Image: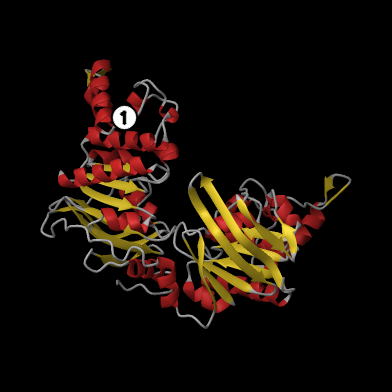
Amino acid sequence: MTVDLAIQVRGLKKSYTPGVPVLRDFDFELRRGEVHALVGSNGAGKSTLAKVLTGLTPANEGEMFLQGRPYGPRTKQEATEAGVVMVLQELNVIPTLTVAENLFLDRLPHRLGVVSRATLRERAGAALRRVGLEGIDPDAPAGTLGVGQRQLVEIAAALAQRSSVLILDEPTAALTGPETDRLFDNIRRLRADGVALIYISHRMDEIERIADAVTVMRDGRRTATHRVGQVETRQLVREMAGSELADRPPRGSSGGNAAIGLSVRDLWSGKAVRGVSFEARRGEILGLAGLIGSGRTETLRALFGAEPIDAGEVRLGPEGAPFRPESPVAAVRRGLALLPEDRQQDGLLLRQPVILNATLATLERHACRGVRQRHREEEAATAVCDRLAVKRDSLEQSVGELSGGNQQKIVIARWLLRGSEVFLFDEPTRGIDVAAKETIYRLLDELAGQGKTLVVVSSDLAELMRISHRIVVLSNGRVTGEFGPENWTPERITEAAFAGYAGETEAA
């Protein structure tokens, strides 16, 4: 093994679900004093690789070496003790603890079991100055910090540890330009000290600025590795997108003269949705493509009243007056339906029976003078569950006992009973089996055939190209492309998905 290798990975395999690999025979090399970028579309396996390297999840097969020695951490602590540290994309700052306590949570300075507050403040001050947060009081509750400041606290905590390998997963997602510059100064300093860094990012301009090498991942495999400066962004996009979808026969048009079902103009919501505009027609399935964090989910939630709308105009129907859904209740009354990304957390009452979950949006219709009519609920729930082939022991079975695919069908059943006109589907086939997927696909076609308006978010590009009449691409909170089957390709859609992170905001 080459002496300057910090990490070497051979034949790594990882599956969370049997038969569904996330990493496939993955090989990778990281050198000392190198910043090695990992790029790839959603589901490529980047974060899973990082979690295997840092002991957060075990690999199924393969071998790893750290500084030339066999390496296989069983916990995050083991990885940290070995010198492998990661800053996760998801913020892990504990809001009720102080900034200083968050920085040194697992290594608080103490004497005879008593924490030395003076030493803790001194060390915390030095760590904060390193990332440009010298104005932050180390004793302040971390919950009082903004998102960007919390991200920097996590980075400062990682930099304060003596590590030989540092993994950064989308570290600049919440940072301003000056904060990013300060982070890059620290990265360059670590590189000069011989620390090896893995840099996971969608932002191609950042990779050009800070990385020495870049590895492209697709479907859990290493597609290619390049030296930065010797490869163009367009080639990386081609390698991320692949060509296996290019020959997919185009879907039939939904009819460009159909009436508008949903019109969104210059929608702003928080920091995630920034001036989004699109139209979806009746009888059309409009796909929303984009990377994780592109604003797809937040757009749907804002349209459903689950996130506040700061500005913009929403209209339902060709002649509909502008309205701003102030709550999900208001949205439902206007004919909107949302199938959320996390069905268990946001879409179902897991301990409640199938019948209640299926009729939840129509309880008033199954009542007489305010009194629930049990037989009406049973008739409605039975009819819609049979229509969707929901496998259940009875209507009284807890919905939490159903399979993932059948749980998803129950959420859809609720909106079918409601008779909604505009359906917002967020990852409708995530975590369900092939047979259930086919049922969902047929249902989407059936709804479109009935003149309903459908907007579907999916991280699976093959799925979007199969089910959609048109695809709108979001990137970094903005629309960066719109495609029909006559001009879409995996490469063009992927390029648009990365465009917002490279400073390119014009539509494709």
Total number of numbered discs in the rendering? 1
Could you tell whether 401 is left or right of 23 in the image? left
Q: Quarter-wise, where is residue 154 in the image?
A: bottom right
Whether 359 is drawn above or below 132: the answer is: above
Q: Which residue is mark 1?
A: 358
Helix, strand or loop status at disc 1: helix
Whether 311 is drawn above or below 17: the answer is: below
Q: Quarter-wise, where is residue 122 in the image?
A: bottom right
- The N terminus: image quadrant: bottom right
Q: Amino acid at mark 1?
A: Ala
Could you tell whether 332 is left or right of 42 in the image? left
Picture coordinates of residue 276, whole percent (x, y): 31, 61
Q: Nearer the viewer, residue 170 or 287?
A: 287
Picture coordinates of residue 204, whole percent (x, y): 48, 73
Whether 75 is drawn above or below 196: the answer is: above
Q: Nearer the viewer, residue 135 or 125?
A: 125
Q: Which residue in the rendered view is the most extreme toward the bottom?
A: 230
Q: Which residue in the rendered view is the most extreme toward the right?
A: 112
Q: Nearer the viewer, residue 17 or 88?
A: 17
Camera sees residue 4: yes
Picture coordinates of residue 452, whole percent (x, y): 19, 46
Could you tell whether 300 is left or right of 206 in the image? left
User: Which residue is rendered at x = 45% and y = 80% of the image?
Assistant: 232
Q: Quarter-wise, where is residue 402 in the image?
A: top left
Picture coordinates of residue 349, whole percent (x, y): 41, 30
Camera sees residue 128: no
Badge 1 local density, few (<14 within 10 Å), some, or many (20+)? many
Render colour scheme: secondary structure
User: Which residue is rendered at x = 36% and y = 64% of the image?
Assistant: 244
- The C terminus: image quadrant: bottom left
Q: Nearer the viewer, residue 104 or 42?
A: 42
